[in-house]
Image (cartoon, grey):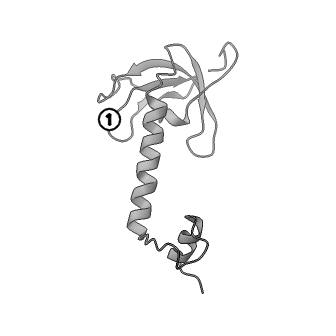
Amino acid sequence: MATVNDRLNKLGGAAHAHERKLTFTPEALRAAKRRERLAREQREASKGRFALGDVVEWTPQAELHYGRVVEIVPAGRYPSKRPSLRVYGYYRDHESYVVECKGDGCYWPRVPLLRRTEGSGDDA
């Protein structure tokens, strides 16, 4: 029966186990995935993709949200106080955005989840 390391070695390019032995611990794999995710988020965040008034959409879990960007939050800061803002987590180490959803309050979504939408945004 092939072990996890054998399968990863095969995926890593070794045609035969004796050609190249790599050892991947579960902790190392989790750390690598986390570094990859953080690097991807920082690349996306550094683009400064959105401006005030842009209509965006995102899917935090299963439900699609639409809204309008109402605040640009600088890196290392929390959003300004708003009665309807749901703030979860720590400040972000990159520029982020507060999005207001019509009839549903304000959100501070993760930047990689945001996508600009077409149209006038009357539904946002």
Q: Position of residue 68 (x, y in %)?
A: 55, 19
Q: Is residue 6 left or right of residue 118?
A: left
The furthest residue to the right: 119
- Looking at this view, is 88 or 41 the one in front? 41
Up the image or down, 59 lies above or below 52; here it is below
Q: Position of residue 47 (x, y in %)?
A: 48, 25
- Looking at this view, is 105 or 119 the one in front? 119
The local crowd at label 1, few if under 14, some if 14 to 19, many if 20 or more residues have their Cα within 10 Å, is some
Q: Position of residue 77 (x, y in %)?
A: 30, 28
- Looking at this view, is 75 or 84 the one in front? 75
Q: Residue at x 37, y 30 (%)?
A: 94
Q: Amino acid at mark 1?
A: Tyr
Q: Residue at x 63, y 41 (%)?
A: 63
Q: Which residue is mark 1?
A: 91
Up the image or down, 3 lies above or below 97; here it is below
Quarter of the picture containing the C terminus is top right
Up the image or down, 31 lies above or below 77; here it is below
The furthest residue to the front: 19
Q: Is residue 98 left or right of residue 104?
A: left
Secondary structure type for disc 1 = loop
In the rendered image, which quarter is residue 81 located in? top left
Q: Position of residue 51 (x, y in %)?
A: 50, 15
Q: Residue at x 69, y 19 (%)?
A: 118
- Looking at this view, is 47 or 85 the one in front? 47
The furthest residue to the left: 76
Up the image or down, 51 lies above or below 1; here it is above
Quarter of the picture containing the N terminus is bottom right
